Image (cartoon, helix red, strand yellow):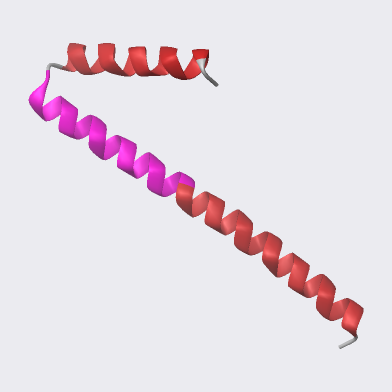
Amino acid sequence: MSEGSDRKMHHALDRLARKEREEFLRRSSTQFLECAIHLCATHMSLSDVADLLEEEARMLRIYR
């Protein structure tokens, strides 16, 4: 392969690796959040968990 072709393939692989890493981190973060919500729900009423999540969402919207 030519040097230009190698460079293009390297950049394409880098982009793919970044995309896959971002997807993995997004899925892992979502799983962690779901586990945390489940943990809260085992020790709090569902209404209290919902209130907590609503408050967290409100703060995220304010400080985004």
Q: Which residue occupies 47% across, 45% down?
A: 26
Q: Which residue occupies 66% across, 62% down?
A: 16
Residue 34 at x, y percent in the picture: 30, 36
In which quadrant is the N terminus drawn?
bottom right
Answer with left or right where residue 45 lies relative to residue 23.
left
Height in image: 60 above or below 31? above
Height in image: 62 above or below 23? above
Q: Quadrant of residue 58?
A: top left
Q: Quadrant of residue 59?
A: top left
Residue 63 at x, y percent in the picture: 51, 18
38 or 3: nearer the viewer: 3
Residue 38 at x, y percent in the picture: 20, 33
Height in image: 55 above or below 39? above
Residue 15 drawn in magenta:
no
Residue 10 at x, y percent in the picture: 75, 73
Chain part drawn in magenta? 26-44
